[in-house]
Structures are given as C-alpha cells and as structure tokens.
Amino acid sequence: MAGRTLTCAAASAALLLGSAALASTAAADNGDDLTAQQLAQQAKDNLLKAKSVHLKLIDHSAGTATSKRQPTAMDLSLDQAGNCVGNLKMGANGGSVEIVKQGDEVWMKPDTAFWKSQVPGAQGGAVAELFKDRYIHGSTQDALLKGMADTCDLRSFQQDIATDTSSDKALTKGEETTVDDTKVIPLNGTEDGKAAVLYVTSDSPHRVVRATQKGGGTDLALAFSDYDKPVPTQTPPADESVDVGKLQEELQSL
C-alpha cells in the first residue's frame, strides 16, 4: 500500500523529469541561462545520483483521502542501501505508522487507530492494546512487514524516474520564486489534463525540491531535501520491540 503510493509520487515527479530526455546537458551554473528542459535534465541527473534523500509527501487526492489503506502523508529519510526512518499517515482516519529499516531488519510501530482500521471488529482494539507503544520487529522477508519495507526503496524510486518514457512533454519556465527559503525556478507541464509543476533550485547544483500535480481528482505534493545526508542509524531498543512472529500468532488466533 505505502510502496504503491511512493511509486505514484515517483510518477508525478517523472512526468516532468522525464521531459528532460531530449535536452542538452549544458553546464551553465545559472538557472536563468538554461532552458526548462536543461534544468529538468540536471535536476533529474542529481536525483538519480543521490545516495540518500528526505521525502515528504502530502496527498489530498480524492481516492486517497477516503482510503484507510493509502497514506495521505509520508515523511521518510531513505538511502540507496534500503535504510530509512520516518512515518506514514493513512487516509480516512486510518491512523499512522512509524517505520525504521536498517539493512534487512524492519521495525514498524502503528498507533491504535491504524490497528483498528487494519484488523476488523473488536480484535483490532485487542491487538492495539497488546502491541501499544511497541515496535513490530522482523525482516524484509516477513509478509506482514514487506509492504512497509518496500516504501524504503530509494533505488526503486530512482528507477521509476529513470525509466519514465514521457520525453515528449513540453515544459515552460515560470518566474523565480522561493520554496522553504530556497530560490527555485518552476517548470510547468501537463499530463492527461493534470497540471504538474517541478521546482528546481536556481543555483547549481540544480536539484528538484518540490513537485506538485493537480487535476482530475489528483492533488499531491512531494518535497525533496537533505540530498546525500546520512539516514539516522539508531534502531528501537529491544525492550520496546516485539517479534513479528508474535503478531502473526495473534492474528491467526482471531
């Protein structure tokens, strides 16, 4: 579920980054000296080279807002090694989940609302109480954790960007503005009637800091920051963690 949302977010960014495929790779440092396509190309290259990045997704799309199984918000720091830390907030008051991943190990801490939305009936409340304020700990091979673990895949996200085929989409440059106190140049495009905007730093290295897409029931924004900043390595202590096998036993007994 969460991994699918990240894929959709990648697609929205790829909408404009993919348009850079036909652009020249000009080396100018000033964004004013580059075409929209050249700026997009440099932003794409820098995103594909990033060893780590901090992503913040806000999704107010019609289908997401009413789904307890799709995140309306994600805040993740992730790297190419598959490590990540962050949280997800589900739609329709479906609760939230904290997630930590280091190597093949995964820790997931849902809140009460999440358990109740995912486990039917009174059993949801019972599971929520049993695992209250504790992390479910396991590996990327555990079926109950794999969906969340897939969210931490920066390489997959980058591959979605790299393999996008929308190279024929026209881009136009907007007036320089600021996003989070950073000077950026908006690059505007459309796809299936949806307006998309990519905000790229005015100064070199040109990096995407924000991507938005609106129209046809879609309304999402994806922010990028902390390029190449190491992902925190601290993992939850053992006394706050429960093996995923315990959760599997409880679910089988319901």
Image (cartoon, rainbow, N blue to C red):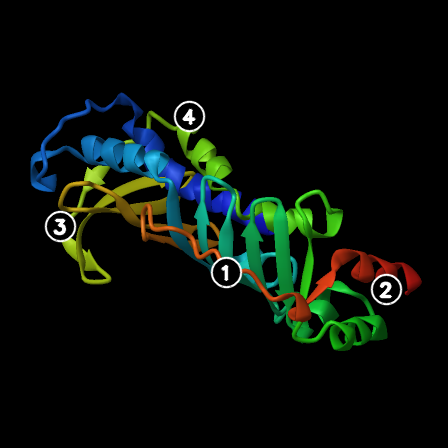
Q: Earlier in the sequence, mark 2 or mark 3?
A: 3
Q: Earlier in the sequence, mark 2 or mark 1?
A: 1
Left/right placement of residue 176 relative to residue 109 reads left
CA–CA distance between discs 3 and 4? 27 Å
Residue linked to disc 3: 175
Question: Which residue is found at the position 33% from the left and 34% from the top?
Answer: 49
Q: Earlier in the sequence, mark 4 or mark 1?
A: 4
**In this rendering, is residue 114 above or below 6?**
below
Q: Residue furthest right?
A: 253
Residue 1 appears in view = no
Amino acid carrying mark 1 in the image: Gln
Tell me the element at label 4. loop
Residue linked to disc 2: 250
The mark found on residue 234 in the picture is 1
Q: Earlier in the sequence, mark 3 or mark 1?
A: 3
Question: Which residue is found at the position 18% from the left and 51% from the top?
Answer: 184
